[in-house]
Amino acid sequence: MNKDIKEELLESIMKFQKLIRLNSDFSLPRGEAMMLLYLSKYKDINPSYLSDKFGLSRSSITGILNSLEEKKYIKRIIDINDRRKMKVNLLDKGEAFIKKMNENHLNIFDKIINKIGNKDTKELIRIINKITESEDINDKNI
């Protein structure tokens, strides 16, 4: 495959990621923000599952959760029936952060849609879905 087109694709993806990141003015590191986003979709998650899902060591997950708990974004709850088990849930501050992040992203996407139009936006969605749903590319099950 043509090396130039691969470099151009990589550069374009990096520019797009930077655009999103620079327009997402949040006070949390990216890993913590992504953890909150995941926890907003799934309740009563245990840290071991998070470790497997994110592909991070248990100690890395513990560090992220410690930081989020200290900042009052999440709460870890020990299972009363089995003290070895723990569940993680968002607190109100975590929910508010996710709401703000989602509103910010929708604002960015409004600007993108206004810039490229509905037709190109639908084409972009089609292409992104084709890539993310391709089993020979997506071996991590996004």
Image (spheres, grey):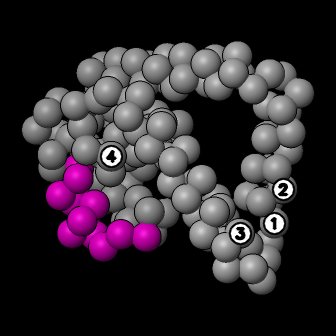
Asked if labels 4 and 3 touch by Cβ distance under 8 angstroms, the answer is no
Q: Mark 1 against mark 3, which lies toward the viewer?
A: 3
Name the residue that disc number 4 marks: 30
What separation in Å lies between label 3 and label 4 (alpha carbons)?
A: 29 Å
Name the residue that disc number 3 marks: 5
Query: Mark 4: which amino acid?
Result: Arg
Q: Mark 3 against mark 2, which lies toward the viewer?
A: 3
Asked if labels 2 and 3 touch by Cβ distance under 8 angstroms, the answer is no
At mark 4, the secondary structure is helix
Residue at x-position 18% and y-position 58%: 63
**Which callout, 4 or 2, points at the residue further toward the start of the chain?**
4
Read off the magenta span.
55-65
What separation in Å lies between label 3 and label 2 (alpha carbons)?
A: 18 Å
Asked if labels 3 and 1 touch by Cβ distance under 8 angstroms, the answer is no
Examine the rendered structure and indicate whether residue 135 appears above or below residue 113.
below
What separation in Å lies between label 1 and label 4 (alpha carbons)?
A: 26 Å
Name the residue that disc number 1 marks: 134
Name the residue that disc number 2 marks: 130
**Which callout, 1 or 4, points at the residue further toward the start of the chain?**
4
How busy is the neighbourhood of tag 3: few (under 14 within 10 Å), some, or many (20 plus)?
Answer: few
Q: Mark 3 against mark 4, which lies toward the viewer?
A: 3
